[in-house]
Amino acid sequence: MKKTSTRLADGRELIYYDLRDDTVRDAVDRRPLDRTVTASEVRHDVLLGDAVAIASHRQGRTYHPPADECPLCPSEGDRLSEIPDSSYDVVVFENRFPSLAGDSGRCEVVCFTSDHNASFADLTEEQARLVLDAWTDRTSELSSLPSVEQVFCFENRGAEIGVTLGHPHGQIYAYPFTTPRTALMLRSVAAHKDATGGENLFDAVLERELADERVVLESEHWVAFVPYAAHWPYEVHLYPKRRVPDLLALDEDARTEFPQVYLELLRRFDRIFAGRDAGESSAGEPATPYIAAWHQAPFGTLEDFEGVDREDFALHLELFTIRRTSGKLKFLAGSESGMSVFINDIRPEAAAQRLREVASS
């Protein structure tokens, strides 16, 4: 992997990640952009104990542009985009409309490929490994910033999810706090460790799932399963079998095997409703919308979670779709949105069975 860092016309950082070590990146952003001005702030909810990012400048962000005006495609001739060069393998840049900025953190965009019509599932294993390496490198860089406590790499796919740019891409949020979801997990880990005299909760969960009927895919170094208390109709958790707190701690064997496992999971998600492959549509049914989210241990102190350190956390990826059946979405209505109590329309065991049935032949 070759890494090349440059600056866009408004001062934002852009980084190319290339498969070839001899690739030269010297294109200049020729757009007449003013320096980016953001108004992001984080407010604390004293009743719920969580945080809310206020980012009113995002109202003016790019919204469903036509393909020939996509800001994530390479620049070509007089059509200038966020990527100055005429091609790229993987590129990361500071979001022009960030939810978090300055002392409130940082937001980055990760473009998986220059092919506008592809999806992550269309990548080769070599390309997927490059994305993993980019996620890992950005986790390392962002976690070293004094304002950052947790790094969150994720992908939203599909208009149903709320994606406003169709180009295959993900994002990285660098939060100045430990997120509520992670805090809940850490509290559970601390309570279990205290109650059992030191047993790790993530290890216990993984052991239980490996012995149950909800395993979707298992390899030498990874296991994917539908969790016992899945919140979403089709939800898969992907764990390395050796517990590590973050992407930085993955060993080479797990990194090498990850692309094969993850690409297979994504392709199964694209088949579960209409038998399609990759990002294709079938009988008018759009490709499966999903969210893919990496859960990593916070990089700040864990003093609020007595008896727990970073090594007690288990890196894992959560992959889920908001579609519950062909043509129907799972909406977060009164119970879910109002009280945070999910109601799942599909038994996790049935979802796991379906995801095994659509395995690659």
Image (cartoon, helix red, strand yellow):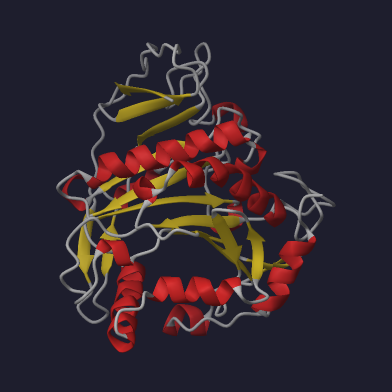
Residue at image coords 65%, 36%: 118
Number of numbered tags placed on the structure image: 0
Q: Is residue 319 left or right of residue 252?
A: right
Query: Image quadrant for the N terminus?
Result: top left
Q: Is residue 331 left or right of residue 268?
A: left
Q: Is residue 207 above or below residue 144?
A: below
Residue at image coords 44%, 81%: 340
Q: Is residue 275 above or below residue 188?
A: above
User: Which residue is farthest bottom?
Assistant: 195
Residue 208 picture quarter: bottom right
Residue 327 in view here: no
Relative to the observer, which residue lies in front, 338 or 144? 144
User: Which residue is farthest right?
Assistant: 283
Q: Position of residue 196 (x, y in %)?
A: 34, 86
Q: Is residue 275 above or below residue 263?
A: below
Q: Position of residue 220 (x, y in %)?
A: 59, 53
Relative to the observer, which residue lies in front, 195 or 36? 195
Q: Position of residue 191 (x, y in %)?
A: 30, 83
Residue 311 picture quarter: bottom left
Relative to the observer, which residue lies in front, 3 or 221? 221
Residue at image coords 41%, 58%: 315
Residue 319 picture quarter: bottom right
Q: Position of residue 105 (x, y in %)?
A: 23, 49
Residue at image coords 34%, 79%: 188
Residue 359 in view here: yes
Relative to the observer, which residue lies in front, 5 or 247? 247
